[in-house]
Image (cartoon, rainbow, N blue to C red):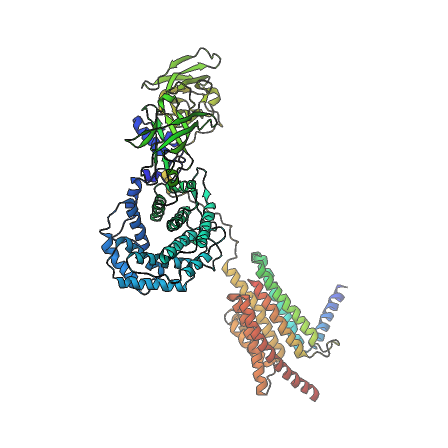
Amino acid sequence: MAKSSSSDAQALIRSLRSAYAATPTNLKIIDLYVVYAITTAVIQIVYMGIVGSFPFNSFLSGILSCVGTAVLAVCLRIQVNKENKEFKDLSPERAFADFVLCNLVLHLVIMNFLG
Amino acid sequence: MASRLHEGKRSDPLRHVVQRMVPNHGSIGLRALICALLSICAAASIRPISDAHRSAALDLFVPSGGLFQSLEETYEALRTFQILGVGNFSDIGPATCPVIIDNLTSPASSPKDLFDAIRVNSILECQIGSQTFKDVAEKFQDLIKSTDKLMNFYYSILGLLHVKAQGVSVVLPDAEGVFYSIKALSQNDGRWQYDSNNAESSTCAAGIALEALAGVVSLADIELVQSKIGTIKHDIVKLFDSINSYDDGTLYFEEKHIDGSEYKGPLATTASVVRGASAFAAIVSEKLNIPGDKLVGIAKFLLSVGVPSSTKDLFNQIDSLSHIENNRISIPLILSLPSTVLSLTSKDQLEVEVTTVFGSAAPPLTVNLVRASSSDVKNNPILENQELQFDTEKNVHYLDILPLKIDIGKYTLEFEISLHDPENLNTYATGGHAHSLIFLTGLVKVDKSQIGIYDTDSESSASMLKLDFFKDDKISLVANHLQKLHLSFQLFTPLGNTIKPHQAFLKLRHESKVEHIFALESSSRQYKIILDFLALVEKFYYLSGRYDIELAVGDAAMENSFLHVLGYIDLDLPEPPERASRPPSLSVDPYARFGPKQEISHIFRAPETRPPKELSLAFLAFTLVPLGGFVIGARVLVDGFHFDAQTKATFISHCFLSMSILVSVQLLTLGVNLKSFPSSSVHALFSLLFHAGIAAILLLYVLFWLKLDLFTTLKVLGLIGVFLIFVGHRTLSCLASTSAGKVKTN
């Protein structure tokens, strides 16, 4: 049974990989961006775990900038994905413009809160 | 010294007793002198103008090189010297005359300068040509025609009066009109306004206006209708009705509205009103209806200032008193006592002087002592209706008090003046009853004084030692904490009555300078104190040893108040328990408070622990690693080439050195690649501007974090944002059109 489960897991992973390879490039870039943002957030949490959260506002602003930009990237991905029927009418350029604008606003707030 | 004491302080006569706590065996005469000098400051004691004022005038008005500080002060000085009859003008004249001529001839002089110059000149009488006077008169006449301010009227009218006194003929144009203009500024309560814009009425202005009106009448020399003068007389009466009074019967004028910048005290205000009223009274044919008592009250107020310490106060006092002395209404007579402390020992007589304010002789009159009552027992008068006899040599009224058998103490006397000649009542004002406070002092006898130690249980078997306070032998006693100290004595006045002195204290001083003071109680006939050492053990801080005994007895009416060291007592007190209070440490040298103070150690909040710098920098580098990873990954995805082992190795080995360069370079290339660079130049420009706009905003954010505040950031952000929106719209729309075209072609 263990062998079959491990082979099942391997088969599952292989099929996931092949399916993922089929996604368009721009979506992959967006996924990579999300991964980058989350990794940065994790590194910040590790740092806080080591030195303590003294300037708590700085810590919060750093974490929230990563998380916020990840969320906005996910929204962009949803809107740009051609398989989504709800956003068929929305051009990807418009979605990208929204993404840029929201990011700018988010970073303004973050810079203010950074202190 | 007398002038300093006359500064209006009401010193308590007890103060001299406190001064005597220092052992001082000086003469009785010295003590009586101190007594007398301090008592002169007591209530309601006024003296006419005397040599003290004359010497004060010479001390206050000191010219430097013949010149005073201003022409106004020059006038005040010269007028004061003239009235008091002191000072010589020989060095003032030559120095001041050029200043006067300069002021009179200069075209830029204000009306006040001209007025000051011309009235100083009327005293100094410099050599000035009549043409100058005519020019000055013309300036004044022009000012009268053009102004409506009270002060300008005052300066010009009185200036014209002084010019006229120099012999130059002066004409006042439209005297009635000027009279009306000044009268128009008057108010209902007898006060005046300074000009028609100023809503507040002022008492000082009333005095000035009255002087100006008197000047108008004497310049114009026409018969002004009696009704007009009658209204002014009504105003004067109303003004005098608004007079204020102190408790001791002195009357004064004061401003009702106090303007902070130009406050003139009661002395200046009263002087101004007196000048105005007397100037007006001088030109009016019949007498003004002002009761003589009010003039006496004002004269008393002016004299109660004593010897003033400022030049303006001295001038106001002397000038207004001279107007009062020479006025046509009634001349006040002042009753004063040359000395308010009388000694029974030296057989003093009660002496009273009645003079005018400047000390000149009064008409024949009699002084009657209506009532003399002790200040402690107010209702029972000691004396009633004693007539004082007149000593023609010394010019005083006196009363022999020794035969009247009055005891020592403080008394309030009430006097009444009656003039011999009833005609004089029209010229002089006596001012009702005058009150005065006197001290009668004498030697107090101490009798039956004894001191002793006795045990608590056996009160009667006390071995009492007789004391004589005025001999020098000291007693020595021994006691322990179970015993009591008993001290008693009796005090008698010269007439044999018992007296309760203001101070009766017993002081015990330890060798270590710790002192304890006890007040003596008085029973019906004697003063005594019983010190129960058992109860006082804790108060004495359990200090055993030798204590010096001192007794202090004093009273304002006692000529021989004393502080005697009676001797010493050796006290044996038990050991202090553990928690007994320590005796107070010796008082620190009072000058030590000016030395450096104790250092204050501030307690600050401990700062938060921060991580070491290297750790923070390491994590900064760590944070940038994912960025690098993202950029490289994006390149991989777009370009589709794989990293081989070699590039991987080079990347890792060069990671820390060239990461930033790699990142920025790859970002740029990525940007170029990602955006599939449009062919048309316009579109390229817009896309470039789009990138530039985003980079600018990010740069702005960095600046905001480093330096800027939110408001400037928002302003700049607004500007760049608008630009970015415009550019971005163009870029993305042409991108959209190209991609739509591609889709269509596909």
Figure disc tally: 0
Residue B172: give x, y in percent of width and height. 36, 61
For residue B179, which quarter of the picture?
bottom left
Q: Does residue B16 appear in the picture of this structure?
A: yes
Residue A32: give x, y in percent of width and height. 64, 72
Residue B461: give x, y in percent of width and height. 44, 10
For residue B31, which quarter of the picture?
top left
Image quadrant where one finds the N terminus of chain B = top left
**Front-most of B739 and B540?**
B540
Q: Does residue B259 appear in the picture of this structure?
A: no
Residue at the far bottom in the pictured view: B745
Q: Residue at x 29, y 40 (%)?
A: B51
Residue at the far right in the pictured view: A1
Q: Is residue B570 left or right of residue A39?
A: left
**Front-most of B281 and A7?**
B281
Residue B700: give x, y in percent of width and height. 54, 71
For residue B399, which quarter of the picture?
top left
Q: Is residue B12 above or below residue A41?
A: above
Q: Residue at x 31, y 42 (%)?
A: B53
Image quadrant where one finds the C terminus of chain B = bottom right
Q: Is residue B441 above or below residue B308?
A: above
Q: Is residue B416 above or below residue B269?
A: above
Q: Is residue B34 left or right of residue B532?
A: left
**Front-most of B534 and B491?**
B491
